Image (cartoon, coloured by chain):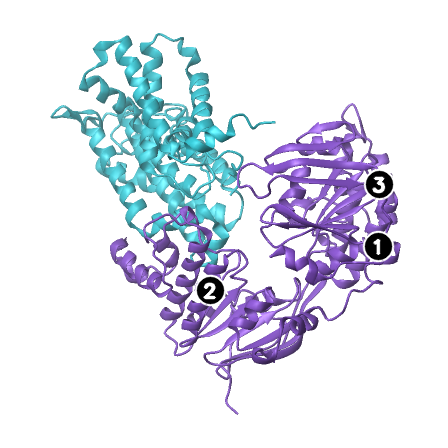
Chain colours: A purple, B cyan
Amino acid sequence: MTTPYLELENITKEYPGVVALDNVDIEVGYNEVLGLVGENGAGKSTLLKIIAGIETPDSGRYLIEGNEVKFKSLLEAQTAGISMVFQEQSLLPNISVSENIYLGSEDKFRNFGILNKRKMYEETKKFLNMVDANIDPKILTGDLEFSDRQMIEIAKSLRIVEEAQTENSIILFDEPTSVLEDEEIQKLFEIIRELKKEHAVIFVSHRLDEVIEISDRVYILKDGKNVAVKPTEHIDQKELHNLMVGRSLQEEYYKIKDQKEIDYINGEVVLATNDLTEKKNKNFCDCCFELYEGEILGFAGVQGSGKEQLGRALFGLENVMGEIKCESYKDIIDFPPEAINQGIAYIPKERSLEGLVFGFDVNDNINLPNYRNLNKYGIIKKQKAREVSKEWVNRLGIKTPSIYTPSASLSGGNQQKVVLAKWLAINEIKILILDHPTRGIDVGAKEEIYELIREVVKRGISIILTSDTLEELIGLSNRIHVMKDGEIVKTFMAPKDNKPTQEQIVSYMV
Amino acid sequence: MFNFNNDLIEKIKKYDLTFIVPIIFLIAIWVTIFTVNPLFLNLRSILSVLVTAVPLIICAFGVTHVIRLGSIDLSIEGQAAFSAVLVSFLLQNNFNNLDLGFWAVIIAIAATTLIGALNGIIHTQVKIPSFISSFGLGAIATGAAILIYRGEPISITDKAFRGFFTNWNFNIPNILIITLVVFLFLYYLQKKTIIGTYVDAIGGDEKLTRLNGIPVNKFKIISFAIAGFCYGIAGVILAARLGTGTADLSSGLLLNGIASVLLGGTALQGGNGGVVRTLIGAVIISSLKTGIIVLRINPYFQEGFIGIVLIAVLLLGAKRGKLVINK
């Protein structure tokens, strides 16, 4: 048996509160395109980061051509011939294309400290030609289209593996197609097929058809575990999908029997929008929808469909035109305090950046938006505030040693409960916008959040939901709007006895 | 709320307004000055305005690199004062018997270069924001300057030294030649060396730059040292011009220095701009001061007026809403 080019054995990686990778084994052959699929949070990105040297595994072996390696940084991995094309682009917008491609490796253009930029431009052209990109190396990177920048990323990777001067090398693609048009994707695939002649490739994508098209073999990850490996010749999307999700819709998991019936004829509309349009980039256009009391309204769509921005707009975080109608209000909302006055609260996707003040303890985080009610002439009623936070810690079952524990030291699920608590503690809040409420928290904690969502709805609060997985969205929602390119293209009713399938929804998303 | 005419501003911004507005503004100031007082329309008076502006211009050059990093340096006045006092102390004077001549200049500038480097070291190694580290170090430098002369201002008696910085040759002031040399050096550094590229990269995204294997801290320290080098030159020029070394020589250079950089169109969040823009910004500030006198505006308005102009120009030019200076 021949040794594969790259091997991972029993790789395990834990983050506080989450096991990202659990004894994962992977082999990549020379000149092979290896696909890697899994749901969000399945561990794809962590795995790539370990291969690229950005993260180090807690345990397990990492071998290249049979020799064990332990990379301490991206740079070390790069010198060994491993290069990654990043999902969130790694290029600096404020310097030129060629400066980006050679950033950190300008040595060969230096003469007594002075850079020979002309030579650098010429060398850059060579790599740009390899990816068939007709781009001026002198131009500022930020002035280019996204797809062009993607090509520059690839050119940079090629530069890195060429300079590594190892006999064999591998290029990792982390969801490179998520924002590309069909035509650009085909171009990318041609490049990958070309690369395959000299390098190994790992290709991560959540579009299963692409993975099947481009890869030789595909690994399926689920909840940090490696569940299967299949050659792509004899596999179809459906089979791949079932392996990836691993379960049909679970009634129990999403508490579907607790789902509220909404009366769409006589029920009260708590929020309606009229031709809501994002002004600058037209992330969403002419969106009209109504939210009923006690309803969970899901928004489905691919990345870039505008669903998150639409949610943010209702909280006054986007620059919009159109109309938002609440009980006693009719205008756009362009300022979060105004949204709160209208009873709207927003639970952001980036919990650590936007949801919590990390230096604050649980008590302060829960009361932060509520201090406006908890003061007398500007002096905080500390006693009352403590009572409020204690009450909500108990009601939501937040696991914390005390209300004075720093929020940052809680697990992801408990942090999310703190974020929820701070809005639920305000009586006037009638509408919650949940932006990926279960992102980055483990399975058990997710279930608790679902329970909480059902509980909240019972109190008459309405919810607007975007979600990491379609499964979750379908499981929780009463109704689902499908968005594509910034417009609402289709609405599905999702009563508890008649949920739409993922395939139905996906067909409108793409 | 605050979205008045954002569309218009966006549209104009496409034509790199941050560069054009300051130039138009500068021209407008001079047109106004010439109209009110046509006697000003001669090379000598224009050169005089530039000569007055030299310490400001050179300090602003120095802080430009730091601002492009996305950092800030509040030690301008302290370092310039230290250099001015140190050079007076080391030259022939009425205070002591030292007479190091040319070497005094070298030592003073080397000293502030080191203080600048120390500034960067404290910022990067102790990991405190440059806002704080430079503020503290600036105060220490001022304190050190005062300690040197202990309340008794030093008068410089070295005529050759003063002459070198104040004489005119062939109708051109020496000092402008010196400024030009400093300018070319910094411009070259910015455009042609690895330092220039890395400074922009760090200002653009520090984390990402680090990921590319670039020793970010090293280049930060170098930038702060370059800044210190510039403040040192400015201090020496101030001492030569006034013939004395005291700690309050440099007052006003901090506000006006940073204002020059911003007026020129270098953004406070870092990653772009450069010394050409700063030159324009610094000349605008000196021209404004001249203009205030020529137009017989009450000089007590001067400081406030510069503040208003700064805000007005930034309103048009800078990328608002993302001002971060805690790096």
| Residue receiving disc 1 | A451
> Farthest residue in the left direction?
B170
Residues A298 and A51: in front is: A298
Closer to viewer: mark 2 or mark 3: 3
Of all chains, the one bearing label 1 is A
Q: In the rendering, which numbered label is found on residue A265?
A: 3
Residue B278 on image: x %, y % = 34, 33
Disc 2 + disc 1, Cβ < 8 Å? no
- Residue B5 x %, y %: 51, 26
* SS assignment at label 3: loop
Callout 2 secondary element: helix
Task: Please identify the quarter of the rendering in which residue A8 is found.
Answer: bottom right
Same subunit, labels 2 and 3: the answer reads yes
> What is the crowding at mark 3: few (fewer than 14 residues within 10 Å), some, or many (at least 20)?
few
Q: Quadrant of the C terminus of chain A?
A: bottom right
Amino acid type, callout 1: Glu
The structure residue drawn at horizontal position 55% and vertical position 66%, both measured from the top left corner, is A49
Q: To which chain does the residue with label 2 belong?
A: A
Distance, label 2 to label 1, CA atoms, is 43 Å
Labelled disc at residue A186: 2
- Real-space Cα separation, disc 2 to disc 3, in angstroms: 47 Å
Quarter of the rendering containing residue A501: bottom right
What amino acid type is highlighted by mark number 3? Ile
- Label 1 crowding class (10 Å Cα cut-off): few <14, some 14-19, many 20+? some
Residues beneath discs 2 and 1 located on the same chain:
yes
Q: Nearer the viewer, mark 3 or mark 1?
A: 3
- Is residue A159 something one can see in this rendering? yes
Residues at marks 3 and 1, common chain? Answer: yes
Where does the image place residue A352, in percent across and percent down from the top left?
Answer: 66, 50
A104 up-or-down from B182: above or below: below
Q: Earlier in the sequence, mark 2 or mark 1?
A: 2
